[in-house]
Image (spheres, rainbow, N blue to C red):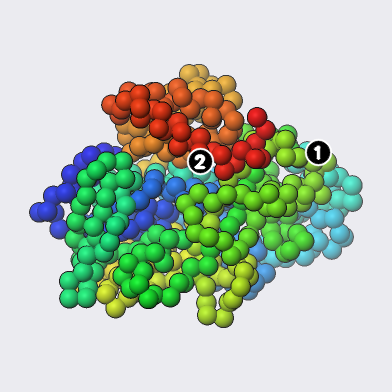
Amino acid sequence: MNRAESIARLADKSEEWDILIVGGGATGLGIAVDAASRGYRTALLEKADFAESTSSKSTKLIHGGVRYLRGGEVGLVRESLRERGRLLRNAPALVKPLSFVVPAYRWYEQFFYGSGLTLYDLLAGDLGIGSTGHLSDLETIGKVQNLRGKGLYGSTFYWDGQFDDARLAIAMARTAYEHGAAVVNHMGVERLLKEKGRVVGVAAKNQVGEDEFEIRAKVVINATGVFSDSIRKMDDPEAEERIAPSQGIHIVLDQSFLGGETAVMIPSTDDGRVLFAIPWKGRVLLGTTDTGPVPVELHPKPESEEVAYLLEHAGRYFEKAPGVGDIKAVFAGLRPLVKPASVAGGDTASISRSHSLTVGESNLVTIAGGKWTTYREMAEDTVTLAERVGDFESRACITADLPLLCEEPSEAKAETISPSLPYRWDDIDRAVEQEMAQTLDDVLSRRTRCTFLETKESKEIAPEVARRMAGLLGKSDEWVSEELTRFSELRSLETPYIPE
């Protein structure tokens, strides 16, 4: 991908866009892939980096959502499981099957969980991964060595999907770009352009430069996730807020706190949440929480109560219990939940994860809600609606069978940027030269996942990475200093939980 080329296209007044997407997370990028692959002249603007907000801070699971069965959302689960199967097929370099155990510490739990997970398999149909089964206590410990053995009757064994969220976002950006879309990160929308009460484009500003643009399009789509109300208020200052974000945090631990390559689902907690302990890139990912109401922020802060909650529940299920000093990284993300009129207060756990599509009086299309697993179907619905809004001739969606252009950073042992991080200097170069990385955080948090794996080590290598980026981008020593300051400020959100 070439950022300068995409910006030049945005500046070219002779290029008329059919669809302009505001937002470069999973939803917006999915729409760009769908629209561009249908042949529409497509542009996408992201104010921060691709997937910098919610979409890089997930539990790293492509799944149907076992807990949604408990809430009776069978349709959402079926839809998610079908999309899981498509992603396993269309992005095999980034989406992999992952085995899970659900430990049973009461005699009836294997039957109880097994019944629900058998239904889970059935809903997946011919796009399923593997069959649910039962393991004895010894078989369970064989797969998860650190699981508490006392009182264990056995477990239910099932399959789901795992992925690297930020890398999949880049794969989607590349795919949209290869199909002719202009995709640009660090390009913020300042206001909507209107004629006769209709939205006809946006005014945008380059966040890493001084240039400004007026970009016109037949249809403008607001796909900004937790920030979608702010775009809606650009259209109508009196618009009622529809997003009720909830915060979920994850902590990253050493691999020994799980032991093995099988994940654990903890189905019952003090407040009814489901927790996961997942092997991920040689570490263990533990999460998530569900805290709300919370303010809408690009970089939300993990709260000490959330960290304590995860550590306490992990201690109940693992022989070697993790403490604050064992945390290698912690990150927080916001879920863009759409609140129905009947939901008040902070009960975000009861809000559906289904998506919502609306068209304003100005013809602004807004897509809100949803989740990573169903991004493709959300995109299909959105582009189909945009065809009606723009009075386009209908074109078939082809994304159900469209391979994504995936290229995961190398995890070779040689030439690594750090002894404890699985990335090479070639990965840094590619991030800048081919993947539109503009900031130090773009490289260390999303093109690679360094800060998500080892926060302390990432801070130590940051100066050398910044200097290498400066050489590739033609930046000065002053830029290096500014980037290091900004990177340190971002990491300060986690430092209370990261031992020095």
- Residue that mark 2 sits on: 490
Q: Nearer the viewer, residue 33 or 333?
A: 333
Residue 213 percent coordinates (x, y): 20, 52
Q: Measured from the top left, where is residue 346 in percent x and y?
A: 62, 69
Q: Position of residue 103 (x, y in %)?
A: 78, 52
> On screen, 299 above or below 431?
below
Residue at 27% over, 41% down: 209
Q: Regarding mark 1 in the picture, which secondary structure is present there?
A: loop
- Is 324 displayed left or right of 83 in the figure? right
Q: Is residue 264 left or right of residue 7?
A: right
The residue carrying pointer 2 sits among few (fewer than 14), some (14 to 19) or many (20 or more) residues within 10 Å by Cα, namely: some
Q: What residue is pinned by disc 1?
A: 320
Can see residue 404? no
Image quadrant containing the N terminus: top left
Q: Is residue 146 left or right of residue 238?
A: right
Task: Give the CA separation, mark 2 to mark 1.
Answer: 31 Å
Relative to the observer, which residue lies in front, 330 or 301? 301
Residue occupying the far right of the picture: 151
Q: Nearer the viewer, residue 478 or 156?
A: 478
* Residue appearing at x 23%, y 57% in the figure: 203
**Mark 1 surroundings within 10 Å by alpha-carbon count, few (fewer than 14), some (14 through 19), many (20 or more):** some
